[in-house]
């Protein structure tokens, strides 16, 4: 039940067909692969979202202006194309 791109146990599309079914999910990520990098990004994003919600940041997000929210999620082209 692990799809490419790091989607697996956390992906709702992988939920059992019936709620009473038990499913055991194993996540296999090899070191030095793209999948390892994707998995690290997913874990980082889960941690960040948890900090926002648990730390009361959810209310702060709802109080942001449209412009401030857009700036928060906008792609920074200089960073995106920088060598690194």
Image (cartoon, rainbow, N blue to C red):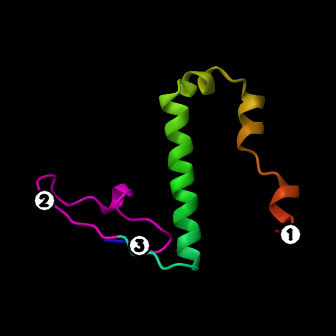
Residue at point 78%, 38% (across, down): 71
Report the mark closest to the observer, 2 or 1: 1
Provide the secondary structure element on which disc 1 rests: loop
Tell me: 59 left or right of 10. right
Tag 2–tag 1 contact (CB < 8 Å) = no
Residue at point 21%, 60% (across, down): 16
Which numbered disc flags the more N-terminal residue, 2 or 3? 3
Chief SS of the magenta region: loop
Q: Is residue 75 magenta?
A: no
Provide the secondary structure element on which disc 3 rests: loop
Magenta stretch: give its range: 4-26
Labelled disc at residue 83: 1
CA distance separating discs 2 and 3: 20 Å
Of 46 and 72, the residue lying toward us: 46
CA distance separating discs 1 and 3: 30 Å
Labelled disc at residue 6: none
Q: Looking at the figure, which quarter contains the N terminus? A: bottom left
Q: How many marks?
A: 3
Tell me: 80 left or right of 47. right
């Amino acid at each position: 039940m692990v799809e490419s791109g790091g989607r697996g146990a956390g992906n709702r599309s992988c939920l059992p067909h019936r709620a009473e079914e038990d499913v055991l999910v194993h996540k296999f990520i090899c070191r030095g692969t793209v999948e390892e990098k994707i998995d690290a990004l997913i874990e980082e994003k889960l941690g960040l979202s948890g900090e926002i919600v648990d730390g009361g940041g959810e209310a702060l997000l709802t109080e942001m202006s449209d412009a401030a929210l857009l700036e928060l999620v906008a792609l920074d082209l200089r960073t995106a194309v920088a060598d690194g």
